[in-house]
Image (tube, helix red, strand yellow):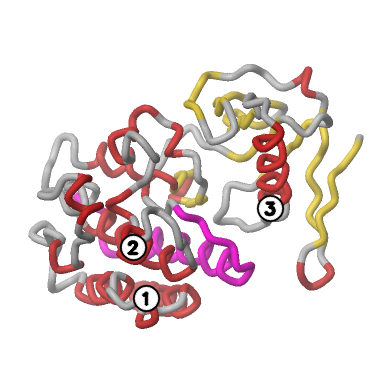
C-alpha cells in the first residue's frame, strides 16, 4: 500500500492512504463543487463517504485542487470530516460522511411535526462545544473556513459533529447562496459583504459562527435576517439587532444569546477568539452536567 504523509505540529504525522481511482465507486451525485463533482458513496468499511473529483480540466483548477488537497489532507481532528483516501492520480479525495445527514436537516426534522420543538439546553451546548472545538483547531492552524453553518455540520451517532464544507454544492441549499457568486450572504460578516465577498479572516469566521449559533438557538425554523432579501443584505449589511429572536428562550439561553451577539459585533476586533468561545462553551457544558 502507498501512503501520503503529512507532517503535523509536535512532530506528529497524519497519513492518508493512496488508492487506485479504479476502485472508487461513482457514488450518488451530491452536487457540483468548485473543482468538479461531489458524490456520496461507500468504500471499504465506510458506509457513507464524500467523494470529491476534479472534473474541471483547466491548469488553474488542477493547481487549486492540489493546493486544497494539501490542506485537507493535513487536517486531523475528531470534529472535522477528515480525508480518508486520496487517489494515486491526485484527482479524487475521499472524506468522512454520515447516514444521518447534517445538523440543519436534523433540526428541520425536529420541528416538522411540532413548531415549538427544539434542542434542549444540554444538547445545544454539546453540539456548539464540538463545533467550536473544530474551529479552535482551524484557528490554531490559521485556516479560514468561509462557510460555517449548520448545513456544514455533519451529525454522526450520539450527536457527534464533524464540520465539512460541501453544502454549497447541494441543490437543497442553493437558495442560501447568491445565484451569481454563490455567496452565503446571510452568514457573511459585514466587512466581507462590504468588500464584495473578499477579505475573509478568522474574525469573519467568528461572525459566521455567531449566525450558526442563531440557527441552533432557533432550531433552524427561521432564516437569518428573513425579512431582508439577499440583494438588500448585499447593499446594506444588517446589524445583529435585525435578527428575529422571538423563538429563543431568553431566560434559559441568555448566556448563549450573549455569546451570539459577541460573535456578531460590527467591529471585528471586538469579537472573541474561537479559543475563548470554546473555553466558555466547555465551562457552560461542565456546569450544566453538574446541575
Q: CA distance from mark 2 to mark 1?
A: 9 Å
Badge 3 is on which residue?
A: 71
**Residue drawn 28% across and 75% down?**
265
108 sits left or right of 245 in the view:
right
- Secondary structure at numbered mark 3: helix
Q: CA distance from mark 2 to mark 3?
A: 24 Å
Is the C terminus in the top left, top right, bottom left or bottom right quadrant? Answer: bottom left
Horizontal and vertical percent position of residue 71: 68, 52
95 sits left or right of 163 in the view:
right
56 sits left or right of 191 in the view:
right
**Residue drawn 82% across and 36% down?**
18
- Secondary structure at numbered mark 1: helix
**Main SS type for the magenta part?**
helix
**Residue drawn 41% across and 65% down?**
204
Horizontal and vertical percent position of residue 38: 55, 28
Q: Is residue 125 above or below residue 108?
A: below
Horizontal and vertical percent position of residue 253: 21, 70
**Residue drawn 11% across and 57% down?**
247
Q: Is residue 222 magenta?
A: no
Q: In which quarter of the view is residue 16 placed? A: top right
Q: Earlier in the sequence, mark 2 or mark 1?
A: 2
Range of the magenta residues? 118-146
Q: Are marks 2 and 1 in contact (CB under 8 Å)?
A: yes
- Secondary structure at numbered mark 2: loop
Badge 2 is on which residue?
A: 189
Horizontal and vertical percent position of residue 115: 12, 43
Q: Nearer the viewer, residue 3 or 239?
A: 239
Q: In which quarter of the view is residue 44 placed? A: top right
Badge 1 is on which residue?
A: 268
Q: Earlier in the sequence, mark 2 or mark 3?
A: 3
Q: Using a 10 Å C-alpha cutoff, classify the residue at mark 2 as few (fewer than 14 neighbours), some (14 to 19) or many (20 or more).
A: many
Amino acid at each position: 500500500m502507498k501512503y501520503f504523509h503529512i507532517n503535523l505540529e509536535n512532530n506528529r504525522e497524519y497519513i492518508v492512504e493512496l488508492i487506485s481511482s479504479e476502485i472508487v465507486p461513482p457514488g450518488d451525485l451530491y452536487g457540483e463543487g468548485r473543482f468538479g463533482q461531489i458524490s456520496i458513496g461507500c468504500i471499504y468499511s465506510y458506509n457513507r463517504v464524500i467523494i470529491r473529483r476534479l472534473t474541471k480540466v483547466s491548469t488553474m483548477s488542477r493547481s487549486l485542487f492540489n493546493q486544497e488537497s494539501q490542506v485537507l489532507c493535513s487536517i486531523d481532528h475528531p470534529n472535522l470530516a477528515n480525508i480518508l483516501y486520496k487517489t494515486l492520480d491526485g484527482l479524487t479525495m475521499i472524506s468522512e460522511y454520515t447516514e444521518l445527514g447534517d445538523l440543519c436537516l436534523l433540526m428541520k426534522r425536529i420541528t416538522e411535526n411540532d413548531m415549538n420543538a427544539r434542542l434542549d439546553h444540554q444538547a445545544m451546548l454539546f453540539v456548539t462545544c464540538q463545533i467550536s472545538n473544530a474551529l479552535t483547531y482551524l484557528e490554531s492552524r490559521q485556516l479560514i473556513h468561509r462557510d460555517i453553518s449548520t448545513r456544514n455540520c455533519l451529525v454522526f451517532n450520539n450527536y457527534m459533529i464533524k464540520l465539512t464544507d460541501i453544502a454549497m454544492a447541494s441543490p437543497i441549499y442553493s437558495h442560501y447562496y447568491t445565484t451569481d457568486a454563490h455567496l452565503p450572504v446571510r452568514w457573511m460578516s459585514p466587512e466581507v459583504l462590504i468588500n464584495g465577498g473578499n477579505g475573509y479572516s478568522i474574525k469573519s469566521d467568528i461572525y459566521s459562527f455567531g449566525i450558526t449559533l442563531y440557527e441552533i438557538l432557533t432550531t433552524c425554523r427561521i432564516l437569518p435576517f428573513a425579512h431582508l432579501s439577499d440583494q438588500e443584505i448585499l447593499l446594506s449589511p444588517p446589524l445583529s439587532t435585525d435578527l428575529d429572536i422571538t423563538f429563543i428562550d431568553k431566560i434559559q439561553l441568555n448566556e448563549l444569546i450573549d455569546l451570539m451577539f459577541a460573535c456578531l459585533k460590527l467591529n471585528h476586533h471586538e469579537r472573541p477568539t474561537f479559543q475563548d468561545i470554546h473555553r466558555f462553551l466547555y465551562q457552560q457544558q461542565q456546569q450544566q452536567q453538574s446541575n
